Image (cartoon, helix red, strand yellow):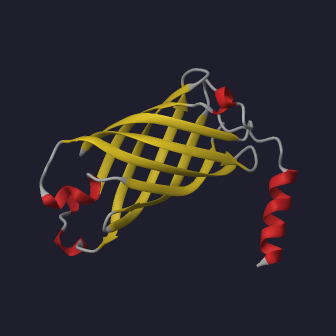
Amino acid sequence: MKNFFTIVLLGAFCLVNAQAFKGKGDTKLNIGMTIQNGGTGILAIADFGLGENFSIGVLTSYLLGGSNINDVNAEYRFDAKARFNANLGSVMNISPKFDVYPGLNLGLKNFGGHLGARYFFSDGFGVFTEFSVPFAKYDSDAMSKYNNGSTFNIGASFNLD
């Protein structure tokens, strides 16, 4: 296990040319896992830079498992959202490889907000984490709770530029 951490740290220090958010024309793809109360699933996020510090994007997620998955109709397992992000990595001036992005999302199940962070190890590969919470729910049906609650997302991030 020590060797694994040594290799990861060495790789992180050797790849210093990565940049988390470059601004207009920058495209990021996040692929990962979503964890929520009673369920887990997969997700894909695409963010497109429109300005120096903001981007728009789309998120799709699908519930794979949960405590009551057999009681959940297929229509409640899928969710899609439009997103707006304020990319604050350059404003915070921590590292060009690190980006923090609060934002808003408008989805099929709710309207909400999210707070995320990306760290790039190289020009094309990094990791991300994100926490999302709904502000307004469109459907109060108990079966829609899987896509109507707070979620924690984690996974790999790819720079498509």
Question: Farthest residue in the bottom direction?
Answer: 1
Residue at 78% x, 73% y is 4
| Residue 114 sits in quarter | top left
Q: Quadrant of the C terminus?
A: top right
Residue at 76% x, 79% y is 1
Q: Position of residue 104 (x, y in %)?
A: 39, 34
Camera sees residue 158:
yes
Query: Is 6 displayed left or right of 108 in the figure?
Result: right
Residue at 38% x, 54% y is 151
Camera sees residue 22:
no
Query: Is 22 displayed left or right of 82 in the figure?
Result: right
Query: Is 143 displayed left or right of 81 in the figure?
Result: left
Question: Farthest residue in the left direction?
Answer: 141
Residue at 24% x, 46% y is 109
Q: Position of residue 20 (x, y in %)?
A: 67, 39
Query: Is 104 displayed left or right of 89 in the figure?
Result: left
How many numbered discs? 0
**86, above or below 60, in the image:** above
**84, above or below 69, in the image:** above
Q: Position of residue 159 (x, y in %)?
A: 64, 42
**39, above or below 57, in the image:** below
Q: Position of residue 33 (x, y in %)?
A: 47, 61
| Residue 111 sits in quarter | top left
